[in-house]
Amino acid sequence: MNRLRQLIIVGLAATSLSSCATVFGGPVTTYQKTKPAPGQPQREVRVGALVADILLTGALGTAIDFATGAIYKPQSAAAAPAAAPAK
């Protein structure tokens, strides 16, 4: 019984310390991690992940997603810079 209680506590702690966008958003790209320079377009926030974070994990989960960059939408292919042509 004590072992089961420990497993439940560890499971709840792991769940509460992970946040929605971190778990469901896929891998975080460099674009999501890097803060835009002055004059550059700002990153867009995933509204669904933000609402889920606030409702399910509170301030802790929301802070984790903003700190890791997982809360931001990945860069779209249209907004991505073109690759330099090979010489």
Image (spheres, rainbow, N blue to C red):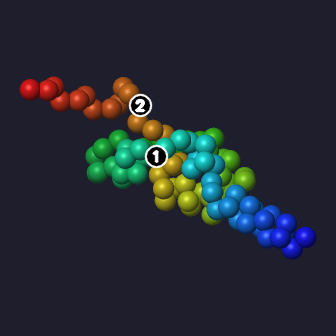
Disc 2 crowd, CA 10 A, few/some/many (<14, 14-19, 20+)? few
Q: Which residue is mark 2?
A: 76
- Secondary structure of residue under mark 2: loop
Q: Give the side of residue 2 with respect to residue 68, left or right.
A: right
Q: Residue at x 68, y 47 (%)?
A: 52
Judging by the rendered image, the residue that carries numbered circle 1 is 28
Q: Residue at x 33, y 49 (%)?
A: 36
Q: Quadrant of the C terminus?
A: top left
Q: Position of residue 80 (x, y in %)?
A: 33, 32
Relative height, residue 58 to residue 77 (above, below)? below
Foreground residue among 33 and 3: 3
Q: Earlier in the sequence, mark 2 or mark 1?
A: 1
Question: From what the image shows, is residue 27 above or below residue 66?
Answer: above
Task: Give 7 or 12, whichever is nearer the viewer.
Answer: 7
Label number found at residue 85: none
Q: Is residue 84 left or right of residue 27?
A: left
Labels 2 and 1 touching (C-beta < 8 A): no
Q: Which type of secondary structure does the marked residue at label 1 adopt?
A: loop
Position of 77 with respect to 72 (left or right) is left
Percent across and percent down for residue 67 are 49, 59
